[in-house]
Amino acid sequence: MTRRVMLVSLCVVGGLSCPALGQDADVIKSAESAAPAAIASGATIYGFDESGMLMTVREGTNGWWCMGDYPASPGPDPMCGDANALEWAQAWMGKTDPPKGKVGFMFMLAGGSDSSNTDPYAMAPAEGNHWVTTGPHVMVLNATGMMAGYPDTADPDTSMPYVMWPGTPYAHLMIPVQ
């Protein structure tokens, strides 16, 4: 999970103002780059209006949602997730426990911006928060009881699967795809 997810979740869940992403066609192209075409082509696409408020750019038909690159982040970070991933993100941003028994899945095939591997709420690098860089990856969310055997160190090798935010209710499996 990247800082971009946190920023977008603040917009989605917290209703905070966020930068506009631009024209609908650009938003859709960016958002669809996050997942395989079979998923992205039928997903609900979210963007931001001129005032920075979240808006639906395209209604979906398959239960998935996608968001384009967040312009204020340092790198490309569009994402797509299933309904359980959205519930997990809402719990994370609300600082409540994730829903029990609902494993979520998220794609970030265009990669993700940097993020702390130890602090789910870090917005910038700081001493001791173990900033990491992720390339194209997928995430398995809310499966804390099923991640035994995967590295859960503060400074993981991000070229291999690892647990992000270990020891928190928001621990999730990061799986690079390149």
Image: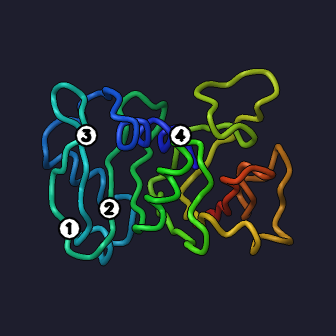
Q: Quadrant of residue 101?
A: bottom right
Q: CA distance from mark 2 to mark 1?
A: 7 Å
Depth check: give the residue in front, 13 or 65. 13
Q: Nearer the viewer, mark 3 or mark 4?
A: 3
Crowdedness of circle 2 by 10 Å Cα count: few (<14), some, many (20+)? many
Q: CA distance from mark 1 to mark 4?
A: 26 Å
Under circle 1, the secondary element is loop
- Residue beneath disc 4: 113
**Residue at the spot 40% in from the left edge and 27% down from the top edge:** 72
Residue flagged by tag 3: what amino acid is it? Answer: Leu
- Residue beneath disc 3: 54
Residue 61 in percent (x, y) is at 20, 74
Q: Can see residue 55? A: yes
Above or below residue 148? Residue 56 is: above
Under circle 3, the secondary element is strand
- Residue beneath disc 1: 60
Residue flagged by tag 1: what amino acid is it? Answer: Gly
Residue 138 in percent (x, y) is at 55, 64
Is mark 1 in CB contact (under 8 Å) with mark 3?
no
Under circle 4, the secondary element is strand
Farthest top residue in view: 127
Q: CA distance from mark 1 to mark 3?
A: 16 Å
**Residue at the spot 57% in from the left edge and 72% down from the top edge:** 103
Is mark 2 in CB contact (under 8 Å) with mark 1?
yes
Residue flagged by tag 4: what amino acid is it? Answer: Ser
Crowdedness of circle 3 by 10 Å Cα count: few (<14), some, many (20+)? many
In-image side of 35 versus 59 (left or right) = right
| Numbered mark located on residue 65 in the image | 2
